[in-house]
Image (cartoon, grey):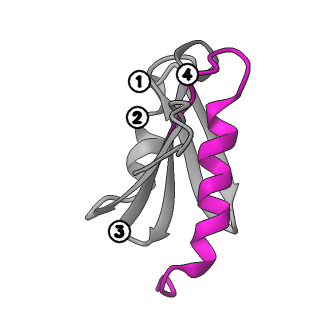
């Protein structure tokens, strides 16, 4: 978890989840208020949120890093309604995925 050093309350974090496929989220798309299939750094991913990210100030994105692994990216911003937390979450993934071991 990264937290803005200025004490501004911005947080970004990653968690690898083994044994879970991106298809798990596709199958449960109806259970999310905010759901969108996206591509991040050439990998299939989904925005999957129970509440509207712009009114809640946080966003969850799940990226398929391997066949049976997803990486969960979480972003939170204190600037609710001003800063899109999904942009932060996606950008964090885009900037970091190239440094990960090759996904096979």
Left or right? Give the position of 3 relative to 53: left
The residue that disc 4 covers is 57
The residue that disc 3 covers is 68
The residue located at (62%, 78%) in the rendering is 98
Cβ–Cβ under 8 Å for marks 2 and 3: no
In the rendered image, the residue lying farthest to the front is: 6
Q: What is the CA distance from the residue labelled 2 to the residue labelled 3?
A: 17 Å
Across and down, in percent, residue 10 comes to: 54, 35
Report crowding for label 3: few under 14, some 14 to 19, many 20 or more residues within 10 A (C-alpha).
Answer: few
Report crowding for label 4: few under 14, some 14 to 19, many 20 or more residues within 10 A (C-alpha).
Answer: many
Report crowding for label 2: few under 14, some 14 to 19, many 20 or more residues within 10 A (C-alpha).
Answer: few
> Of label 4 and label 1, which has the lower sequence position?
1
- Local SS, label 2: loop
> Of label 4 and label 2, which has the lower sequence position?
2
Across and down, in percent, residue 54 comes to: 64, 18
> Of label 2 and label 3, which has the lower sequence position?
2
Cβ–Cβ under 8 Å for marks 2 and 1: yes
The residue located at (70%, 40%) in the rendering is 87
Q: In this orientation, which residue lies closer to the viewer: 57 or 31?
A: 57
Magenta residues, start to end: 75-104
Q: What is the CA distance from the residue labelled 2 to the residue labelled 1?
A: 6 Å
- Local SS, label 1: helix
> Of label 4 and label 3, which has the lower sequence position?
4
Q: What is the CA distance from the residue labelled 4 to the residue labelled 3?
A: 29 Å
Which label sits on residue 28?
A: 2
């Amino acid at each position: 978890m990264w937290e803005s050093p200025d004490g501004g309350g911005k947080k970004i974090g990653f968690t690898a989840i083994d044994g879970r496929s991106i298809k798990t989220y596709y199958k449960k798309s109806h259970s999310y208020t905010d759901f969108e299939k996206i591509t991040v750094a050439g990998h299939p991913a989904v925005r999957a949120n129970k509440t509207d990210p712009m009114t809640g100030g946080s966003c969850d994105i799940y990226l398929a890093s391997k066949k049976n692994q997803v990486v969960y990216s979480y972003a939170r911003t204190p600037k609710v309604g001003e800063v899109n937390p999904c942009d932060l979450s996606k950008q964090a993934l885009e900037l970091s995925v190239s440094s990960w071991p090759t996904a096979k």
